[in-house]
Image (cartoon, rainbow, N blue to C red):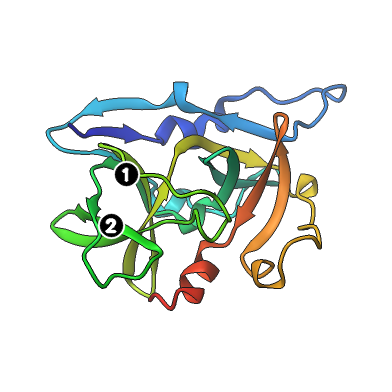
Amino acid sequence: MKKKISFKKMLDIETKKPKKTKREEVPLMKKVISQNIEEKKTEKSVMTKIPPSRRKIDSGEGYQKIVLFRLSNEFYAIDVSMIDEIIETNVKEKIAGMPDFVTGVISLRGESLPVISLFNRFHLKERPLRESETILITSRNGKLYGILIDELKGVLDIKPSFIFDVPMAFLDDEFSYLKGMFKYDNEIAAIVDIGQILMKYKLG
């Protein structure tokens, strides 16, 4: 059973916050998390559409809007401008002959989309597919692709000054798609350029 999720409150919540006094510190990030999600059941899908007008790099007050998610025990983020929608659905096993990085396919409004696994790219252990998966939908050159994740943490507004450079410990090949890092609670999250990853996979 698929459900429908709206991010309207998540994307608009900062406009309802009172103005800060001079003594208040500017937070590292403004959290917009799952309790602000309105759920609406439909016959087939959990779908969150992010309107193009909301997919802005700067969300106001010097903040950058990102989609934060978990893969295994690590956290990653993608600029909201790169995400068309987020769905929860069943992923069918991949067809013989598909590349190793394609974990399966999904059906979205009558169109079959490949679902890409980032586990190998991020040096994480692969896992078997679940009955229902959370998929980020992105596009490149007019073609849609699904990105498999373990858990959606929400949409965050983060101040660019709190984003630090990627350490030199990472392989040279990874510097092209790791755009920065920031602290999330007691963890470190990496900002990923999904367009660069698709280009490396020669998709789109």
**Left or right of residue 37, residue 19 in this image:** right
Question: Does residue 177 lie above or below 47 as drawn?
Answer: below
Which amino acid type is shown beneath numbered disc 2?
A: Gly
**Does dot 1 land on a helix, a strand or a loop?**
loop
Q: Position of residue 113 (x, y in %)?
A: 26, 61
Q: Using the image, determine if residue 83 lies above or below residue 90.
A: below
Q: CB of mark 1 within 8 Å of CB of mark 2?
A: yes
What residue appears at the point 44 percent right and 40 percent down from the top-left corner?
A: 150
133 sits left or right of 64 in the view = left
- The tag on residue 64 is none
Which is nearer the eye, 94 or 30?
Answer: 94
Q: Circle 2 sits on which residue?
A: 104
Viewer-proximal residue, 143 or 24? 143
Q: Residues within 10 Å of mark 2 (few under 14, many from 20)?
A: many
Q: Residue at x 32, y 64 (%)?
A: 144
With respect to residue 100, does 128 lie above or below? above
Q: Which residue type carries mark 1? A: Leu
- Name the element at disc 2: strand
Which quarter shows the C terminus? bottom left
Query: Of marks 1 and 2, which one's residue comes earlier in the chain?
Result: 2
Q: Residue 107: x percent and y percent?
A: 19, 54
Q: Picture quarter containing residue 188?
A: top right
Rendered-image quadrant of the N terminus: top left
Q: From mark 1 to mark 2, how far is it between C-alphas?
A: 9 Å
Q: Which residue is mark 1?
A: 129
* Residue 69 drawn at (x, y percent): 52, 41
